[in-house]
Image: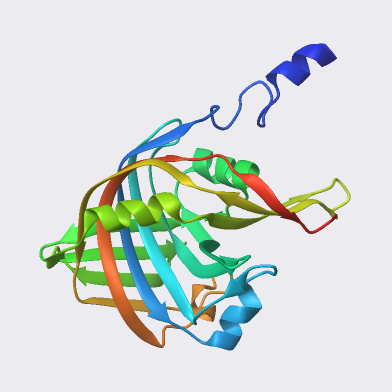
Amino acid sequence: MDIKTIRERAFAMPLTNPAYPMGPYRFVNREFFIISYRTDPDRLRAMVPEPLQITAPVVNYEFIRMPDSTGFGDYTESGQVIPVQYKGQPGNYTHAMFLDDHPPLAGGRELWGFPKKLAQPRLHTEVDTLVGTLDYGPVRVATGTMGYKHRTLDMQAINSSLSATPNYLLKIIPHVDGRPRICELVCYNLEDVNVKGAWEGPASLSLAPHALAPVADLPVLEVLGAKHFVADLTLGLGKVVFDYLA
């Protein structure tokens, strides 16, 4: 294979059999269960990279079912997203994410810099309760519950928030000698969002310590609320807003 062909074909690894296809990446009937909670402000501050700033000691713990996603298939994610500010504008910083499918794990890390690791998240309805769980191997590290569709939320408000809020990631790719070759703050947006239903209800969240899935390092001090919604959306490609190696 000549150099010109390599340059034309190379967009992901492996070269001759990429782990995921080219985007855009459209998600249909993506189901979100998000529990907002108050945590320790000092621990939170230690987790959020400058130049992002925290505005309140709040974490959003997420369970997300993705039954129909372009190129990535059918999978589930779970993790922590932190409300932040960048240059005075509100946004979200993805701190940790665990999922059960290789193509979005590889694509998420390589393209955007999502902090994804392999685990076993699940989101389902158990009689009258929405239940989200995260297992890392045989160990249960997160359990979230909410009363199923107790109250309807404003779908347009959620649609506007998803579309307008920028999302931030810390993308790190090492050099062959182990030093960081890329270390960037990346921003992306959700596009063509269509919220199909949204609800809230009483909720709880339990996080357990684990050496390799340390979600409990941001402890739950108080559950502030929860929401459950279903949407179609496109995951927009990112842009670099800060280069730590410059």
- Indicate the quadrant containing the N terminus: top left, top right, bottom left or bottom right: top right
Quadrant of the rendered image containing residue 191 = top left
Q: Is residue 114 visible?
A: yes
> What residue lies at 54% left-to-right and 46% top-to-bottom?
105
Q: Nearer the viewer, residue 160 or 104?
A: 160
Q: Position of residue 139 (x, y in %)?
A: 44, 69
Can you say whether 153 is above or below 217 in the image?
A: above
Q: Residue furthest right?
A: 177
Q: Is residue 1 visible?
A: no
> What residue lies at 67% left-to-right and 69% top-to-bottom?
49
> What residue lies at 76% left-to-right and 18% top-to-bottom?
6
Q: Position of residue 109 (x, y in %)?
A: 61, 47
Quadrant of the rendered image containing residue 13 = top right
Q: Position of residue 200 (x, y in %)?
A: 20, 67
Quadrant of the rendered image containing residue 155 = bottom left
Can you say whether 227 is above or below 181 in the image?
A: below
- Indicate the quadrant containing the C terminus: top left, top right, bottom left or bottom right: bottom right
Q: Nearer the viewer, residue 108 or 38?
A: 38
Q: Is residue 240 left or right of residue 122?
A: right
Q: Is residue 108 left or right of residue 232?
A: right
> What residue lies at 64% left-to-right and 43% top-to-bottom?
110
Can you say whether 178 is above or below 103 in the image?
A: below
Can you say whether 9 is above or below 172 in the image?
A: above
Q: Residue furthest front?
A: 88
